[in-house]
Image: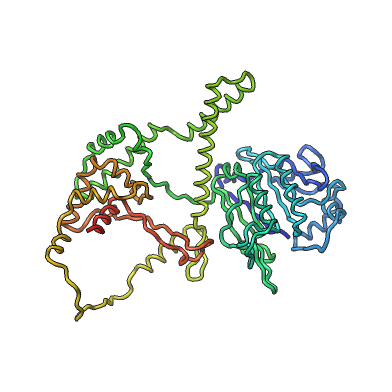
Amino acid sequence: MTASVAVYADGIGEHNCSPLECAPLSCWVPRVAEDLVLSTVDEECIEVANGGCIRPPVKAGQRGLRELRGLFSSETKLASSNSALVRSLWGSPFVDWAFSVSVLLRGVLDGFEWVCTGLYGPNADHHRAALWEELSRVRVRWNTACFLFGDFNIIRYPCERLGSETFSPAMFAFSDFIENNYLVDLPLDGASFTWFRDAEPQAMSRIDRTLVSVDWVDHFGDVSQRVLPRVISDHCPLLVEAGGVGRGRCAFKFENMWLKVEGFVERIKQWWEGYSFVGSPSFVLAQKLKALKEDLKKWNKEEFGDLAFKKKCLLSELMGLDAKEELLGLSNAAQSRRTRLKEGDNNTRFFHRLANSHRRANHIRSIEVDGVLYEDESAVKSQVIQFYQNLYTETGMWRPTVDGLEFACIGEDERLSLEREFSREEVTQALMEMEGDKAPGPDGFTMAFFQKCWSVVEVDVMAVFEHFHRYSVFERSLNASFLSLIPKKNNAIDVKDFRPISLVGSVYKLLSKVLAKI
């Protein structure tokens, strides 16, 4: 029996209604020989019960219902099956054997229509061509967003089966089907395999998976897929979540594209000279950068506007041009305008999909610490923080001694060179040698900002260096860091399988660079 797949979305709106709550519109089971619509909402051969559940027709045979209940109550594997058994299960003489069942759904909240296809793939390679043909026919019949899930009984890569080392023609055919139908093979979190044979010889593979169309992912946003523990079956259940990737609070991030706007440096200078704060040089610099963030946010909205609203306006204009072309035709200028709008929308969609893909890959849904698995978001955060606090906290007061050891000594000139004040030239040189587009720290400013606007911020930055040289202290906020966990291997779950890196603030990064060059 194929592994079960649950689809879940975070509750939103009134009555905590999920965006994945749908009403069935039509169900289709393709025949091997010809296409056949099994039932629709408008026909009498299907009943839609309260809550949107589909149940067999009233006239279904009692024998088929008993066998169907048996399949749901326990895992049953038949040695063989035939058309008579299939018709008795469905309670209809008009159906025949097929690999899949597809249902056209409409979202209760937004009216979004999509096709959900459950399938069970054949074990023999010579039958798989019929499976790909059948699924392609479903895509042709309903040219809309789709969601395919089930036991495909085939893997895509050798690493998805224990002991497999080479590709097979069946694997290539599977990947060709996915690419030809523009489907997305959702990454699997939590495990590498979905099916296990506990008896000897032991076997395990990833034959259960979920495939979705690009427009399905675009509509539901953050989509992830993870493995749940198996209890009875030899297959692991799969949980697909939409909107389940927590983003947290959106921090400020300086956009390097702003530096290309004409008059940007002059605008920064005007704002910078208008700030007035009292305190240590590092405190003044931290407060000025904080005030600059707010001015940049306001200016960005005024200069570039609400990007989401602009996109809706452009798409409306594009629809108007398409309608005008159907009725009257378009001029060359209008055709060029429509082409630019479509290319821009395609680029935007591409980068959104890329960002969503990275977000799914980077999201830590569960963590294992000392053999205990934590899945709750707050528990994951607290356990990671506690682990690294314990790791970097000293428990003893022992210190190594160097009594009686001889070390080479530096000369007087070298000692004076180490203790001299920071010069403007060495700070400027260190700044210009740094990468301008590296990921920023908590302050959100890239080094490209300081490089481009050095004439504006130089006095305040050099004051921080002079104050640090004299008192060896600076504002605590300048030393804040983002701790990022980089997995050392695929499907990392143990906290020790991650490598921590620090994203430090821009001023602290510059200070460290200057000290390293002394």
Q: How is the image coloured?
A: rainbow
Please indicate whether residue 101 sits to the left or right of residue 435 in the image.
Answer: right
Image position of 157 with respect to 100: above or below? below
Judged left or right of residue 462, residue 82 is: right
Label count reads 0
Residue 109 in the image: state x and y as whole percent. Answer: 61, 40
Residue drawn at (51%, 70%) of the image: 371
The residue at the far left in this view is 412
| Res. 321 visible in picture | yes
Could you tell whether 473 is left or right of 349 in the image?
left
Give the residue at the far top of this rendering.
Answer: 328
User: Which is nearer the eye, 477 or 508?
Assistant: 508
Position of residue 478 measured from the top left corner of the image (x, y, whole percent): 28, 52
Q: Whole-percent x and y of residue 406?
A: 19, 77
Q: Residue at left 60%, top 53%?
A: 240
Residue placed most toward the observer, 222 or 182: 182
The answer to whether 405 appears left or right of 449 in the picture is left
Q: Residue at x 77, y 56 (%)?
A: 126
Front residue of 136/475: it is 136
